[in-house]
Each structure stands twice: as C-alpha cells, then as structure tokens.
Amino acid sequence: MNDEITLLNCDKEPIHIPGRIQSHGFIVISSPDTLRVDQISENVVSFLGEEYSSYLGKELGIILSNQTITSIKNFIAKQDFSLFNPQKITIKTKEQEKTFNLICSLSNNILILEFEPFIENEQSTDSYFYYSFNTALTKIQATKNLDELFEVTAEQVKQLIDYDRVMIYRFDKDWHGEVVGEARNENIEPFFGLHYPHTDIPAQARELYLRNWIRLITDVNSPQPLIHPTLNPNTNKPVDLSDTILRATSPIHIEYLKNMGVVGTLTISIIFKGKLWGLFACHNYSPKFISYNLRITCELIGKVFSNHLDYKQADHDNKYRDLIKSNNASIIEKMSEKWNIVDGLIKSTTNILNLNEASGAALYYDEEVYLLGQTPSNDQIKVIAEYLNKTSENLIVTNELSTIVPEAINFKDKASGLMAVKISENEYVMWFKPEVIQTVNWGGKPDEKNIVVEDNKVRLSPRKSFEKWSQVVENKSTEWKDSEIEVAEQLRENIINIVLKNSTQLKKLNKELKYQRDALASKNDELLNFAYIASHDLKEPLRMIISYNQLLLKKYKDQLDEGAIDFIQYSVDGGNRMKVLIESLLQYAKIGYDSNDFTDVNINEVVGNCLANLSFAIKEKDVKIEIDNMPTIKGDKILLILLFQNLVGNAIKYGSKNSPKIKISFKELKEEYCFCISDNGIGIEEKEFENIFAMFKRLHSKSEFEGTGIGLATCKKIVEYHKGNIWVESDPGKGSQFYFTIKKDLDE
Ligand code: ADP
C-alpha cells in the first residue's frame, strides 16, 4: 500500500502489454528469423482443436501453408505488411477446414500473426465495401456546417456497422470529452451534449488512439485468453501489442464499460492536424465483431471526416479571421501613418475592440490607461499589469483570470477572460470578456472513480454512475479563438516595431534638435558679441563725434553763425540718440544671457529703485503715483527693475498732461503673479495692441515723443524670460493698463 492512489493512477496501467488477447481470434508470436512459434494464445484450441503447447517451438508451417510463409518472408523483408493484410487463409483442422483473416505486424523485430475468423457474408465483399464507403462519402461531402457534419457522419457510421449507438466525442484542451454528434437506436437514452472527464480516457489510451485508428472490443464479458509463455523467449519481456487488433482490454476499462452496460465497442480515432481531436465511440449492448474490411471502411470515414473538419472549420473561421486581419491591418496603418500608437489603437473608428469578440479593451502605455467598452477600472488594470509583469510571457490568454489575478474575482463581470500582449514592463494591450455562467452536463459525476480494496490490494475502480450530472461553471468567460490569438500576436509585433522606430526617430529628432539648439546658441553668442562689439566699438567713435562737436560749439561758438551752430547741435543730439539706441539694443540682447539665477526679489524694492531712477521726470511732470504693497517673488532683480522702469517711464511719457496719475498694482493668482501699470494718458488704439511690443515699433514721431521703440520689446523679452505674458488694455484718450505676469515656479 505504498503507492498513493489517485485518479490518475490508471494513467500508469501498462495497457499495451497486457499478456492477454480478446477471445474472438488467436495470436501467434514468432521471430522473423526463425519463423517458429515462440508464443501462442491459449485459446488456439477453440479454433484449431489442439492445445497451445502442441504448437510451441514448431515451425509456422504447422499452421500456415508454404505459400503464405513465402509471402510473409517477402513482407518481412519490406518491413511493411500493409499490402499483405488481411490475408484470407484456410487452415485444416482435424474436423474441417477453417477460413481466417490473417493480419501480420512487426513489433520491435517480433513477428505477430493475428487470426480472425473470416465471416463469409455480403459485408465481406469488395463491392459492399465500395458501395458503403461511397454512400458515406457523398453524404459527408454534402454537409454544410460542422453540426451537420457531426450528425451525418455519426449516422453513416451507424448504418455501416449497425451498433446501438455511435457518438462523435470531441476532446477539449484539458482532454475532457463532449458528445457533439450521435446516432442511436430510439429505445436508448441520448448522450448527445454530455461531457466526460479526462480520466475516462487516460493518457496512454489516447496515445494508442493516435497510433492506431481503430480499436475493437467485441465482448467485455468473454474471458481474455493468456499468451504462452508470458515473456517472449528471445527478449524475456512481454510483447508490445500496441499495433494489434486482438490486444486484450484493460480490466479498468472493461469494468468501466460494464458499469455503463456496454458489451461491445468500436473506437475510430479522429486525428486533426496531427492531434487526437476526438473519437467515434461506438457502443453495442451485445457482443459484436466487425470484419477487417468494415473496419478499414470506418478508418477511411474517420480520415474523410478529419479532412472535412479541417475544411468546414476553416470555412467557418476564415471569414472571421479575414475580417479581424483586415481590421488589424487598418489599425497598423493608422499607427504607422502618424507614428502614434495611442491614436492608432484607440482613437480610430477601427480600434483594438474590432480585433476579437472582447467586450472591453485597454491600452496601458506610457503610464496612461486608455479604455474602450466594458473594462475594469484604471486601478484594477494596473493590478492586472503587476501580475503580468511577473511572467516572462509576451502573450497571456486565459478564460479564467482569477486563477492568475485573484483580485479579478471582484470584477469578473467585466474581466473573467483576459488576453494581453506585452509591449514592455507595465505597458500592455488588454482585452476583456465577461463571466459567462455555464451549465455543463456530465455523463455522470466526473470524480466518481473509486478506490476499491480487493484481496488485500488497493486499486481504482472506474465510476459506476453515468447518471446525467449538471455542473454550474462560474468565473469563466468564453474561450479566445486561435485566430484572435494569432491577430493579437501580430499586433504586438507591429506595436513593438513602431515603438522601436519611434525611439530611433526620437533619437534622430533629439540629435537634430540639439544640433539646432547649438547652432542657435552660437548664433546668439555671435549676435551678443556683435551687440557688444557694436556698442563698444561704436560708442567710442560716437563719444568722439559728440565730444568734438560739443568742443567745437564751446570753443568756436563766437566765430560760427547761427546756422552752423544749429547744425552742430543737431549732430550732438543725433549722436546722443544713437548712444541711447545702442545702449538699449545692448540691454535687449543681454536679457537671459548674462543674467544671474533667479533669487527672491522684493518688488517693493524694485519699484523703489525704478522710481528713484525716474524721479526727475516724476517731479517735472508732477505725477501722482499710487502703489500697492508688492510681494516678494522669484526673479532676476536687475531685469525686473528694467521692466518696471520701461513701463512706468512710458506711463509718464505718454501720460496725461494735466494731472498725470499712475497706479502700480498686483494680484496673486494660482500659478503666477499679475502686475499692472496703468495711466490716465493718451491711450492706444486696439489695432495697435499687439504691434507695440515689436522691436522699433513706435506710434509717434520723435518730435511728439522721444523714444527708440525698443522699450516694450525689451519688456516682452524680460517677461517671457520669467515665463509670463504681457499685454495691454486701453481706452484711447483715457489711459492704458499694461499687464504682465511672472510665473511662481520658474523651474518648471
Ligand atoms: P518708445 O521708445 O517709443 O516708448 P516703446 O517700445 O516703449 O518705445 O513703446 C512703443 C510704443 O508704444 C510707443 O512709441 C508708444 O506709441 C506706445 N506706448 C507705449 N507705452 C504707452 C503708454 N503708456 N500709453 C500710450 N502709448 C504707449
């Protein structure tokens, strides 16, 4: 009792080396070299009238004619008996001649000869074989869809072999089976639609079904004769009977069939794309033998069925596959057009929701979650991504998300099914399907294999109950289709390509940008240098022009007439204006270049400095100035003084002639300070509001108002340097309000 007994234990039963056969025929095992009887089944006596022992060690000639032996030798040389089988032979016994179908095979260089009684009837003729196969083929070909294919093929097989029940049994991915087609006698209950657990057909049985297309059990109640001796004298091992038709049935399977009330079975494998797709499971409630020819016909029908399965399934899937592939192509085109993943995947009319039957989809990209349709919340999507990050898989497909992400049980109505493709860590495209509560009808309770203690031994006995048992399946969505998975994989590849190209593109752009920035910086430096050189080099000759002209006036005033004096005075004035212009230009060019870091600047001090610099004009024009209590802000003090000075200077210059008033006020906003310098002067027409901030733009002649047209351009540059805006509001004739903002956080 050391072995642990589990349901899967019957997976270990060595069903290919049972040491016994079924009793409807007898078996002889020989060596291809000696062609002697090395082993023989004990039931030979019931066919040939002699005990098995009388054959052991004898040449095959004791049973077979020389002609048959010669033929066998030929086929041994070819290592293939497919053109030999079955060989109709007659064996003379003491009483009579008996006809058999001889079927030969080679197993690990051991020759196996199976003898099945030949039944002479209509069904054994070639014309019957041809006719029945042709009829079945025509009917199968005429079916229009899968359901019809299942129904018609089951019916054709039933007509051919005349069993009580013929089922088409389809395996799912976990090897549970479902009856998808059935033809049966009317007096027996239907099994159509019932499910059977994977333990009903264990792995090694499935392996044999993949190897041999046909399995016949003629009578579960008849004894299963032994092969003598049990071990092959040449190998000292039991002979592998995998490829034989007479191979005995496993006791567990016999018990299973008996529990079901079934006496004879014929099983035909349905192999689709190299995999065991399902079986024709044929049940008879009394013993039944099926001749070799008929079995071959069934095998052919199985193959035709598999082909049609491919074709019908493909036809059904192809339309859908074509549709989602073309949607995928249009999404990829959109993405590549703009090099923009989000726009392509989410924002177009054809988007990721058109790539499968999901009810919701999400794109988690660049730390943003974008949702479409019925989906979990943003936070829940992030939780899913955390779990997905732990796997190395690039494609995750499940119809029971809670098995991967336990929290998903809370949003199973939105996401019991998940298909996700990974773009990179924390970047996914996800599709969701809601829970679909299903009732699965089982042909008996699936876990009903029992542990039985018999003769002090523990063994498994198969389940006894085949009563319909309904199971409610929760937390699961419908399955994802192969074509949907294929398209998701394609989409992932394309996204990755675009991401990669984007990053190369970005690198290129960055490089270009850096190049342009460097070029601009050097241009600016050049300009600045130019401004310095101009100011420095021009200032000196200019100073000379002005001072020599002034000297001229001073020294030779008496010798000059009035006209000459005026001319010289004009030159001095012009020279002085030029000096102002050059200095203003220099000031403008320097903004942002040789400025210091931003520091805390008390604007009360700034305004104080500015008014001190303008004190002469203020006094002269008797300007009334009202000032709010100003804040301390981050900024460049020198530039801010220049800013206020320009604006207040203009307010004085363009202010009222009679009783000039200036107000300097401010307002603290959420992200910035807003200052205002208002006057009650000449004002500005609305059409000039923008223009006055341009370099050299003046609205008045020099004779009306002195000026360079650089002041407001300088103000604009200073404000922009402090990440703010400057604008004007005005009522011509009544006054102007110049507003500017300074950003609180200048590091942003
Ligand atoms: P300027 O050296 O001519 O003052 P600015 O750049 O400072 O140069 O101003 C440009 C023009 O904007 C000025 O010529 C003037 O016409 C107009 N302007 C500036 N400030 C005011 C103001 N407070 N009131 C009316 N007009 C103004």
Image (tube, helix red, strand yellow):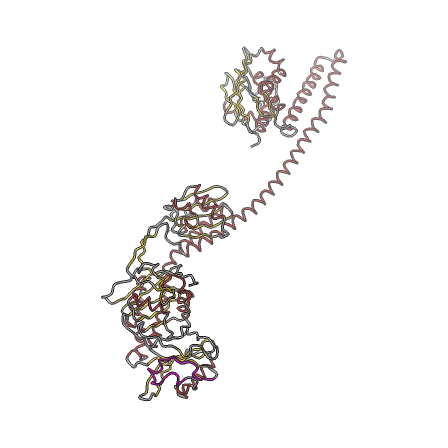
**Magenta includes 191?**
no
Along the line of sight, the residue nearer the viewer: 561 or 191: 191
Q: Reply above or below: 628 against 444.
A: above
Residue 150 seen in render: yes
Residue occupying the far front of the picture: 456
Q: Reply above or below: 49 against 705.
A: below
Query: Which residue does the image show at 64% across and 25% down from the upper left?
Result: 587
> How far across and down, in percent of the image, does residue 302 sit?
36, 69
> How far across and down, in percent of the image, does residue 298 sit?
34, 72
> How far across and down, in percent of the image, does residue 173 sit?
40, 59
Along the line of sight, the residue nearer the viewer: 102 or 538: 102
Q: Reply above or below: 467 against 517.
A: below
> How far across and down, in percent of the image, does residue 163 sit?
28, 70
Q: Reply above or below: 242 against 450.
A: below
Residue 223: image quadrant is: bottom left
Residue 338 seen in render: no
Q: In which quarter of the image is ligand 1?
A: top right
Q: Point out the image quarter for the C terminus.
A: top right
Residue occupying the far left of the picture: 187
Residue 413 lies left or right of residue 530; in this view the side is left
Q: Point out the image quarter for the N terminus.
A: bottom left
Magenta part of the chain: 34-55
Residue 586 lies left or right of residue 41; in this view the side is right
Along the line of sight, the residue nearer the viewer: 288 or 582: 288
Figure disc tally: 0
Residue 304 lies left or right of residue 734; in this view the side is left
**Magenta includes 43?**
yes
